[in-house]
Image (cartoon, rainbow, N blue to C red):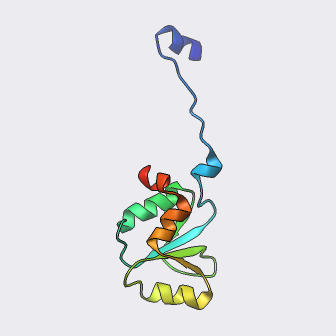
Amino acid sequence: MVAQLKRVGINPKVQRTDTARAQPLAGQTIVVTGTLATFDRKRIEDLIVQLGGKASGSVSKKTSFVVAGENAGSKLEKATELGVRVLNEAEFVNLIGADAVRGT
């Protein structure tokens, strides 16, 4: 099939990615709470999934960390209660890398 494509002028190429780098949130469950300055809720949750994580709506012992903006409320309180790591927006961007943010 590749030979047929090449005969008609199409040169297919395999694009390889560094999956470890492309998936910095692999296997992690992240909860987003409060109002964020840079992201709207859908965008940050889509980004979490694209980077290999799971965006969750509730905090539990299985939560890897919480990204908390202003007026975070009960989810922030629950994370603190359970000893779940809490990041602000800047810390989250630092964790995933600015390139990951620009790539969305």
Q: Nearer the viewer, residue 26 or 18?
A: 18
Depicted 75 relative to depicted 65: above or below: below
Left-right relation of 61 to 76: right
Q: Position of residue 7 (x, y in %)?
A: 51, 8
98 or 11: nearer the eye? Answer: 98
- Which residue is the extreme one toward the top? 7
- Residue 23 in the image, given as x and y percentages of width and height: 59, 54
Judge whether residue 104 can be spotted in this image. Answer: no
Residue at 52% across, 57% down: 97
In the image, what residue occupies the spot 45% across and 64% down?
Answer: 45
* Above or below 13: residue 18: below
Quadrant location of the N terminus in the rendered image: top right
Is residue 96 depicted above or below 57 in this figure? above
Name above or below for residue 12 compared with residue 50. Answer: above
**How many numbered discs?**
0
Q: Residue at x 49, y 53 (%)?
A: 100
Residue 10: % across, % down: 48, 16
Q: Position of residue 75 (x, y in %)?
A: 48, 84
Residue 2 can be seen, yes or no: yes
Residue at 47% x, 10% y is: 8
